Image: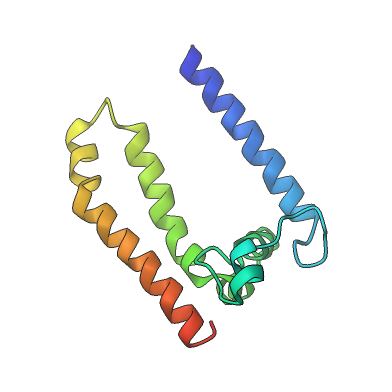
Amino acid sequence: MRRSLILVIAIALLLVFCFIYYALDPSTSEVFPQCYFLSLTGYKCPGCGTQRAIHALLHGDVAGAFRYNALLVIAIPWIAFCLFVESRRTRSPRLYARFNPELLMLLFLALVLMWWLLRNIFNW
């Protein structure tokens, strides 16, 4: 029962955030926070453009979302898969163990760090 309640609350919050990101444009609205790393250093962090990319995706603009933050668009299927594996953690421990090893997480971290470097070198 408790797990179902948590799931319902999580889905409700997700829907609220989707509505906000659909209705308001992070490029023009002051409701959304700005990137402190970009403001302080002039360099983009790995997450820069994520809010605008989410807004673009909710409006069906995949190409625009890719221009704002390509890593986010590429990572969405991976994130969905990880959530699925996590939801099966107790029912399928072998599945969880197979797709949640430390090496895989380190590779994902390396991908994020490479994205951070490359987007600043090539101004992506």
Q: Residue furthest top?
A: 1
Q: Residue furthest front?
A: 40
Q: Residue at x 67, y 65 (%)?
A: 52
33 vs 71: above or below? above
Q: Quadrant of residue 51?
A: bottom right
- With 67 as the anchor, is 52 left or right in this view? right
Q: Residue at x 56, y 76 (%)?
A: 43
- With 91 as the anchor, is 50 left or right in this view? right
> Where does the image place residue 19, in percent across and percent down from the top left?
74, 46
85 vs 21: above or below? above
> Where does the image place residue 73, in percent across and percent down from the top left?
50, 65
Count of marks, rendered view? 0
Q: Using the image as rendered, state which of residue 36 and residue 49 is in the foreground.
A: 36
Q: Using the image as rendered, state which of residue 50 and residue 98 is in the foreground.
A: 50
- With 23 as the anchor, is 57 left or right in this view? left
Q: Residue at x 53, y 27 (%)?
A: 7
Q: Residue furthest bottom?
A: 122
> Where does the image place residue 107, in percent across and percent down from the top left?
26, 61
Q: Residue at x 49, y 79 (%)?
A: 119
> Where does the image place residue 47, in percent across and percent down from the top left?
54, 63
Q: How did the renderer colour the structure?
A: rainbow
